[in-house]
Image (cartoon, rainbow, N blue to C red):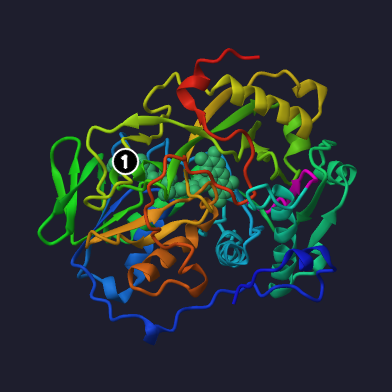
Amino acid sequence: MASAVSMKDVLSCPAHILPDVTLTPMDPDAAPKYKPPSSILIIGAGVFGLSTALALTKRPEFASTTSITVLDRSPDPGVFPARDASSIDSSRIIRPDYADPAYAALASEAQAHWRQTDPASLGGEGRYTESGFILASDSGPMEREDGSPTGIAYAKKSWINALALAQREGRPLSTVRMLPYSQSIAKMSGTGGEFADWGYINDASGWADAERSMKWFFEKVAATGRITFANGTAESLETDDSTKRVTGARLKDGSTLSADLVIVAAGAWTPTLVDLSSQAVATGQVLGYLELTEEEQAKLEKIPVLLNISTGFFVIPPRNRVLKVARHGYGYLNPKPLAKPPSGIPGSKATSKLVSQPYTHLDNSALSIPPEGETALRKALRKIIPWPELQDRPFSKTRLCWYTDTPTGDWIIDHHPYWNGLFIATGGSGHAFKFLPVIGDKVVDCIMGKCPVEFQKKWKWRETQVTETPIVTQDGSRGGKIGLILETEMNQVQT
Ligand SMILES: Cc1cc2nc3c(=O)[nH]c(=O)nc-3n(C[C@H](O)[C@H](O)[C@H](O)COP(=O)(O)OP(=O)(O)OC[C@H]3O[C@@H](n4cnc5c(N)ncnc54)[C@H](O)[C@@H]3O)c2cc1C
């Protein structure tokens, strides 16, 4: 069973106190008998939606008798998910390096799939690269004033869990090496950048080509022949108030799709369909891409993934002469009114009038990022890769990508407490991509009442509370300023 370590443990020699980083399956006899629905509609074909679809096809309970439809607002016929989904990008970090041992254990399960690199497997044909990963932080206190962990606390707990996983997976502990000074980080980074004060390198972490991995995964799901894919935007959920049941979705074109079970896996758009006030919020995150010369590509393609978890800035090794720099931050809020209120608990006082919603390059092809974000990315790049030739090279492309943030960074994978026939699978909080090969299995376990023990509380629907304070993910992994409003920041002048 995954067990947490105390701060005292973290600061002492770890070798003999490594925590147990395994997940406990739920006793199958303890789960209620599950009666599968005859039809399922999954809204969203990102990591959560596609992975769930594949897992459903593998379960005997849902075999042949249950029809399964995946709906996505992707405007390109037959293309799933939409190109502005957060699951689509040049790269995503694949790391079991988590402060929370339960996510570390689950990420280790996922990594067993990513490490299958024969051409027919997920990690094959360059979809996964085990480059190593430096997780580093600024020095300072372990806790903020509100008691939430800081970056250094996250980094040190993660280091312990990474060592524990090395031991469990039979790798030498030397595959996880402490980097106690900024100089050791600079040396190990391969860039010379003194971008943090303390950290470690995990040789067993890496990165994935997200777009190509999603394509591979979509094709695998489609090849089952069990799923109907539909292009279209769900505008609202259809409900039957007398039975307190969600019966399907109404689409923007006026048509409806009916199902006995509706799984909303719409990523950062989920709060537009289901009232998630005080539980999850869409936050816009900045990315910058820099074109490199062949020589620079050759020098940088062997570096590990580099992350300062206190500031949130990270660099992923380049592919095809494009380097990516991004910020795992608190992000921008984009509060806007909705044409139709999201499905909530009738009479709930918590329903917000304005809901933060994604705004992407599919809404506006000329969309750039706020000057604050661009300046911050530039500053971070100079620190992480302090090479004169890259200092002022303009970004060839920038992007706003949307997280579905929860207060703790835990996902929401649960039946809706009021509406029968409604299940929520979201709350990726900027770290769910790596779980693509395993998350669907866990979603299906939770649908059937068999949520893994360690995640039962973490993934539960939280009681909606009346609060005007915006949701802020305080798991120690975020940088930037809290509460920035996208529209205001877009109108600022670059400094
Ligand atoms: C900049 C950035 C960097 C990240 N880095 C990492 C990383 O390094 N490692 C990692 O593990 N994770 C990372 N993540 C997080 C990870 O990518 C996400 O947690 C994950 O992809 C979320 O998947 P999802 O299925 O919830 O959402 P999405 O991929 O956004 O999928 C939701 C889908 O729902 C569809 N949809 C929405 N509304 C509707 C509607 N009304 N009707 C029909 N369809 C709808 C959308 O079109 C979309 O395709 C990062 C995310 C971002 C944005």
Q: What residue is shown with label 1? A: 272
Circle 1 crowding by C-alpha within 10 Å: few under 14, some 14–19, many from 20: many
Question: Three-letter amino acid code at disc 1?
Answer: Thr
Q: Is residue 478 magenta?
A: no
Q: Out of 324 and 378, give the one closest to the viewer.
A: 378
Q: Out of 443 and 132, give the one closest to the viewer.
A: 443
Image spot of residue 229 (x, y percent): 27, 49
Image spot of residue 189 (x, y percent): 80, 43
Q: Residue furthest left?
A: 242
Q: Residue at x 63, y 73 (%)?
A: 3
Q: Quick check: is the Cβ at mark 1 less than 8 Å away from ligand 1?
A: yes
| 43 relative to 301 in the view: left or right | left
Q: Quadrant of the C terminus?
A: top right
Image spot of residue 253 (x, y percent): 16, 35
Q: Where does ligand 1 appear, by image quarter?
A: top left
Q: Identify whether 225 is placed above or below 382.
A: below
Image spot of residue 154 (x, y percent): 69, 54
Q: Which residues are magenta?
A: 129-140
| 63 relative to 241 in the view: left or right | right
Q: Out of 343 and 215, give the one closest to the viewer.
A: 343
| 217 relative to 62 in the view: left or right | right
Q: Residue furthest bottom?
A: 29
Q: Residue at x 72, y 26 (%)?
A: 379
